[in-house]
Image: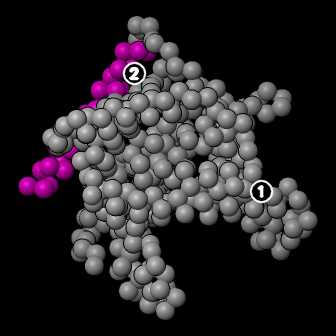
Amino acid sequence: MERTRTTADKLLLFLKGLAMGAANKVPGVSGGVVAFVAGFYEEFIYSLQKINRKALLLLLNGRFKSLYNYLNGKFLFILLLGMVFSYFSISKVLDFLLERYELYVWSLFFGMIIGSIYYIYRDFNQWDYRTLTALISGCVVGVAISFLDPAKENDNLWFVLFCGMISVSGMTLPGFSGSFILILLGNYVLLLVDSVNALYDTMADILRWDFSFTNDTERVRMLKVLAVFTFGSIIGLVTLSHILSYILKHYKNFTIATIIGFIIGSLGVVWPWKYTFYRLNADGTPLLDSSGQKIIENYDRYIPTWSSETMIAIFYIAIGIFIILALAWYGDRIKR
């Protein structure tokens, strides 16, 4: 049975959903880090793992209220509402800021992740050779992923299914960015731009009562790709939540140490000083996504020289650290 939530609790959870949705939108930033630092990661994972055989039976038997309560429905609904609302609000602001103040936005993210590492590390005191090994392994994997070169685009439906399953990692695995993983797999444009645009066009055609798209083989192919990707994402979300729920229950210290390592490794992805390479059209102009933003192809990181711009970036890193520490202090005060 889900716990009773006050209006303040609901508003705070909605804001956490906003933050998680915004983080998931940016390649290199993980929504799972938001869930972990904001203190609802375990409830999120345990709620998702309730999507099982019992939930299916409740659905088939028409016991919708029981299903809602069993799935911790109020928690998931408010969180999802915040994430969806974020896509049309906060993430749009982030797109604007990344377009014009890229270095400073990445500096803020970098600082927030450093603050997050400290926040998680502060309350974890179960260090031994097992957890240290987990920490190092997670860090190595995170760093290795951040420096991989992107693969070629691949629209094989089995591979698309795999992309869907792994792309939700950013929501369930702190330190892993689902959108960045899709860039590395070479299918970011195919799955988050081309197929989504095909869906928008199809919905517009249907509203005009125009079904001629059924004869458009390219449109049908894109819709098929999107359907398989969506199905894979659902499978991945449910499967990962069950696996993580089991691991958190039986190997909690090992899991937290690995997560800390993942987050440390992810610092390579959000390193502020980097040249951003964008996907180009045939005429050499930047390819845009459905929201009109340039599509990132890859990054080339560098060590900055000392300048006023570097000083401002460092200031934003400090601001990011301060934000997380202030939120941690506020959370500790509420708990008292």
Q: State left or right for residue 26 relative to residue 154.
A: left
Closer to the camera in the image, 51 or 282? 51
Determine the residue located farthest toward the left in the rendered image. Answer: 336
Q: Is residue 304 shown above or below 125?
A: above
Task: Please tell me the numbered disc located at residue 313.
Answer: 2
Is residue 99 in sight in this rendering?
yes
Is residue 323 in sight in this rendering?
no
The percent position of residue 274, horizontal first and vertical second, equals: 52, 21
Residue visible at 75% across and 49% down? 155
Q: Which residue matches tag 1?
A: 222
Counting residues from the start of the chain, the first of labels 1 and 2 encountered is: 1
- The secondary structure type at the circle numbered 2 is helix
Task: Give the residue type that dot 1 points to.
Answer: Met
User: What is the chief secondary structure element of the magenta stretch?
Assistant: helix
Quarter of the N terminus within the rendering: bottom left
Closer to the camera in the image, 125 or 179? 125
Task: Give the residue type that dot 2 points to.
Answer: Ala
Q: State left or right for residue 187 relative to residue 128.
A: right
The percent position of residue 260, horizontal first and vertical second, equals: 31, 39
- Which stretch did the figure color magenta? 309-336
In the rendered image, residue 335 lying in the magenta stretch gets the answer yes
**Nearer the viewer's eye, disc 1 or disc 2?**
1
Q: Is residue 207 shown above or below 62?
A: above
Q: Is residue 82 shown above or below 330?
A: below
The percent position of residue 31, horizontal first and vertical second, equals: 42, 48
